[in-house]
Image: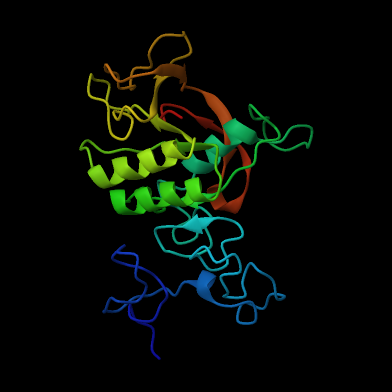
Amino acid sequence: LPLSASCNLIDENVDGIIDNESGSVVYQNPSRLNCTAQGLPLSKNCNNIDDDVNGYIDDVNGWDFVNFDNKPQAGELNIGGSGIDHGTMVSGIAAGNANNGVGTAGVDWYTKILPVQAIDDDSYGNTFSVARAIRYAADMGADVINLSLGTSSADSYLLSAIEYAVDKNVVVVAAAGNTDCNCMIYPAAFDATISVGALGTSGTRASFSSYGTALDVMAPGVSITSSTATSGNFTSAYATGNGTS
């Protein structure tokens, strides 16, 4: 078939259903092809079988809830997107390995990261994709879910997903926001989350950090050195005024 939105294996309208769209496109999702079509040896990463019967095919390394495939790698669709570095940066802060001659050391060298993409490479997402990502992480046994994202409006569907995770004894951490006002974003404003604001290098509130009565804790948020996924490489980079985690 000629390449089109009806057969490119991408969920363009982010409704959880692949290829129910129409129209011209320029890209086909390589992550949905099986091992043979990708020239890879047969494995659970690409055999197109839901081996653990959890509803997600080949999710050995996590899940992308934007494109609904098994490759949550940042920058897969837009290597220059504005949202490709932040998740990798936060992961490096939490769990970057030490004594390997690469980058920086994280807080806990033995922590395991479950990669889940809830917003796209251009920093766009919705409460549908984020809520499904939260439920998935909770079902897969995550102990902590980090949400360095947010919106100005409360959403009951998102809240129910967070409460679902909390009921499974998951700690859900969310960024207070970067709007420099008493106007915390959601989901940080929900009581079910641990909301985090940013400190500057002087130990006082960073100029960009949001705040409010729902704020639980402050943490360093300026001039933090961590990993980045730019150009597919893991290197040292500064995160300055780039959100809280």
Judge whether 240 appears above or below 15 on screen: above
56 vs 72, nearest the viewer: 56
**Residue 141 quadrant:** top right
Q: Residue at x 49, y 35 (%)?
A: 169
Q: Residue at x 59, y 64 (%)?
A: 52
Q: Residue furthest bottom?
A: 1
Q: Residue at x 41, y 36 (%)?
A: 148
**Residue 163 quadrant:** top left
Which quarter of the rendered picture does the N terminus lie within?
bottom left
200 vs 210, nearest the viewer: 210
Percent position of residue 29, x then y: 47, 71
Q: Residue furthest left?
A: 153
Percent position of residue 144, x then y: 52, 35
Q: Residue at x 55, y 42 (%)?
A: 142
Q: Is residue 147 visible?
A: no
Percent position of residue 127, x then y: 29, 48
